[in-house]
Image (tube, rainbow, N blue to C red):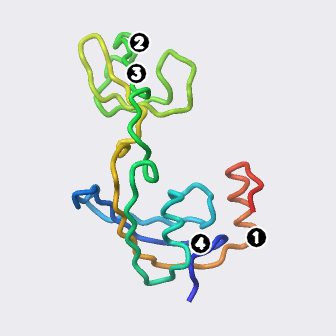
Amino acid sequence: METIAPGRWVRLRYRMFDSTGLELEPVPRELTYLHGGFGDLLSALEAALAGHGEGESVSAYLEPEAAFGNYDPELIRLVPRAGLPAEIEAGMTFEGVPGEASDGRLYVATDLTADTVVLDANHPLSGMAVRFEIEIQEVWPASEEEIAAERDRLGTTQK
């Protein structure tokens, strides 16, 4: 049986819960990622999965700083509605604050008034402790070419 280690592909199914046990998404999600710090999975989850194998289940409880970060009020921007599209609605996403040089963050319109829009760049789950229930479906070795492709995607030379 293959176990999870750097340089192995992992296919898993997971569910997320808040700290009270409330399920955060209506259906389980599936993910296939290359294990070893390539950025497709939270590093705390990679650490929790290391050494486990196909068919195993893993439960991981992450505090906000290890999950989606602490809520940062500095990532809230109040912007004049006049500088935004006329058809703006709550939930619309912008890359950067419209009318400003992009800072690379995604901002979500969360509140609207006649004159102002609240844009929030915090992750929707920031500030929350989250429990992941994970089922490991499959683990298999990655080829050197696949690992190189992931390094290229990240622009890194990590080993």
Calculate the distance from the C-alpha at mark 1 to the C-alpha at mark 3.
44 Å
The answer for how far apart the CA atoms under marks 2 and 3 are is 13 Å
Q: Report the amino acid beneath label 4.
A: Trp
On the image, the x and y values in percent for residue 87 come to 31, 22
| Residue depicted at 49% across the width and 69% down the height | 48
Q: For this view, does 32 lie left or right of residue 156?
A: left
Of the pair 143 and 46, the residue shown nearer to us: 46
Which residue is depicted at the point 28% across and 56% down? 18
Amino acid found under the numbered disc labelled 1 = Glu
Numbered mark located on residue 83 in the image: 2
Pointer 3 and pointer 4: residues touching (CB < 8 Å)? no
Q: Nearer the viewer, residue 126 or 106?
A: 126
Q: Quadrant of the C terminus?
A: bottom right
The amino acid on which the numbered mark 3 sits, given as a three-letter code, is Arg
| Left or right, 27 with reference to 137 | left
Name the residue that disc number 4 marks: 9
State the CA–CA distance, disc 1 to disc 2.
Answer: 49 Å
Residue 121: x and y in percent read: 43, 32
Name the element at disc 1. helix
Q: CA distance from mark 3 to mark 4?
A: 39 Å
